[in-house]
Amino acid sequence: MAKTYSERDLVTVEDFFALVPDGQKADLIDGVIYMASPDSTRNDQLAGFVRFLVQGYSRVKDLGMVFGSRFAFELSHIRAPEPDVAFVSIARLHLVEETRMKGAPDIAVEIVARESRSRDYFEKKNLYESAGVLEYWIIDPLQLRAEFYRLLDGRYHLVPLEQNRIFRSEVLEGFWLDVEWLFADKLPNEFEKLQQILNS
């Protein structure tokens, strides 16, 4: 039987920051803390690859700031997810504080792990949608699957891939991603791929 929580049971954002050690990835979703298991080598490398591409592109184009998986986004007093990769546009950087952002990122990326699958595909998708995250990217190395959602009229819509492999971001204008890079046996050279994106 699922446990129900009263208002007194719910963990607040301030509790969350007090309870979770610095450096530990965790999410606060509707007053419940979900601690992440240690990353697999593949997930760690994949998150680093995506972050490098988004961060490199953003810096060259001066579009905003990119965050990794230990940075929280305070969406309400009981919601503070930590996406694996997140992008915040330059116009919204005034909301970024030393330990958190007061508000949602423009792009949230989750790399699916066995223990996070349900949260990434359901709870976090709903959370990001209701918070107004403009794009949500789900990258699932376990199922060799990637889904990209764009917010239209307050609801997420799955973005079709060009040639079944190319995703083009609207938030990061001009940025694109080939999903075949993500699921290659060995991740490609991120410097070469960033140059390929920038030169296209």
Image (cartoon, grey):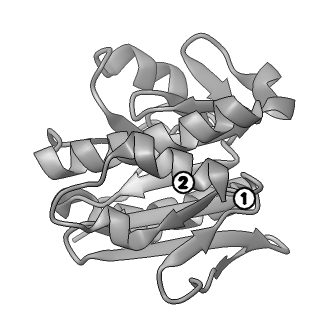
Q: Amino acid at mark 2?
A: Gln
In-front residue for pair 43/199: 199
Rendered view: 134 above or below 99: below
For label 2, the residue is: 196
x then y, percent, for residue 109: 49, 53
Q: Amino acid at mark 1?
A: Leu
In-front residue for pair 148/174: 174
Rendered view: 11 above or below 114: above
x 16%, y 42%: residue:
37
Image position of 66 (left or right of 15): right
Label 2: which secondary element: helix
Mark 1 surroundings within 10 Å by alpha-carbon count, few (fewer than 14), some (14 through 19), many (20 or more):
many
x 58%, y 72%: residue:
167
Q: Is residue 32 visible?
A: no
- Whether tag 1 and tag 2 are in contact, CB under 8 A, the answer is no
x then y, percent, for residue 92: 81, 32
In-front residue for pair 128/171: 171
Q: Which mark is residue 134?
A: 1
C-alpha separation, residue under disc 1 versus residue under disc 2: 25 Å
User: Which quadrant is home to the C terminus?
Assistant: bottom right
